Amino acid sequence: MKLELPAGTFRAYLFDCDGTIVDSMPLHYKAWRSSLAEYGATYEEELFYSWGGRPIREIIRLLNEMQGLDMPVEQVAERKEALYHQLVPTLRPIPEVVEHIDAKHGHIPMAVVSGSRRSSVTASLSAVGLLDKFDTLVCAEDYINGKPAPDAFLLAAQRLGVAPSDCLVFEDTNLGIEAATAAGMLSVKVPQPLERLS
């Protein structure tokens, strides 16, 4: 798998975390299935990947609606995150993305822009030894409107002091690509595990 970058000179790189820098989506799915099973809820793998980039609490609310359940949102979210943290030591980075991080580290500013909470992002990046490569982390606590709204990417550009049009976004989800486009940024699509297998 080779990532095709759009033409142009970029003054900053913005990376989604889960499924983009770290191959964490299979681990997140495992944590989701275990935490939801405790409430008799299901979450199909295809739906999980199509909802990539959505905040965890929004996912629980949507599953409640779809399945006529009344799962306690905060409790399920905390349980799911706790289960994910147990799996973090087995996490691996996505080499094709790390290649671009290594190539530009120290040359242009870089940020992580994630729908996950800071504790989860920090744990993931620390597990693969990449936390010190980024100038700022924009996480779920930092903005109100999640992807596909452009807010998180615009905040990252502002923190780095770079115009949105000079930023290149690395993303694995359609929601993330939509958010980057809405922010006026070009993007690179990182294939998801199901796409990499096909």
Image (cartoon, rainbow, N blue to C red):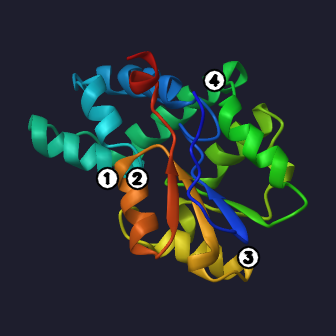
Q: Residue at x 40, y 52 (%)?
A: 55
Q: Earlier in the sequence, mark 3 or mark 4?
A: 4
Question: Which element is circle 1 on?
Answer: helix
Question: Which element is circle 4 on?
Answer: helix
| Amino acid, disc 1 | Glu
Residue 103 image position (x, y, % from top left): 83, 48
Q: Earlier in the sequence, mark 3 or mark 1?
A: 1
Q: Residue at x 85, y 54 (%)?
A: 105
Q: Which residue is mark 2?
A: 55
Residue 36 image position (x, y, % from top left): 32, 27
The circle on residue 160 is: 3
Q: Quadrant of residue 145?
A: bottom left
If the image is split into quadrants, where does the N terminus sit?
top right
Q: Which residue is mark 1?
A: 58
Q: CA distance from mark 3 to mark 4?
A: 32 Å
Image side of residue 31 versus residue 43, left or right? right
Circle 1 packing at 10 Å, graded few (<14), some (14-19), many (20+), is: few
Image side of residue 2 versus residue 41, left or right? right
Question: Which element is circle 3 on?
Answer: helix
Q: Nearer the viewer, mark 2 or mark 4?
A: 2
Circle 2 packing at 10 Å, graded few (<14), some (14-19), many (20+), is: some
Q: Earlier in the sequence, mark 4 or mark 1?
A: 1
| Amino acid, disc 2 | Pro
Q: Which residue is mark 4?
A: 86
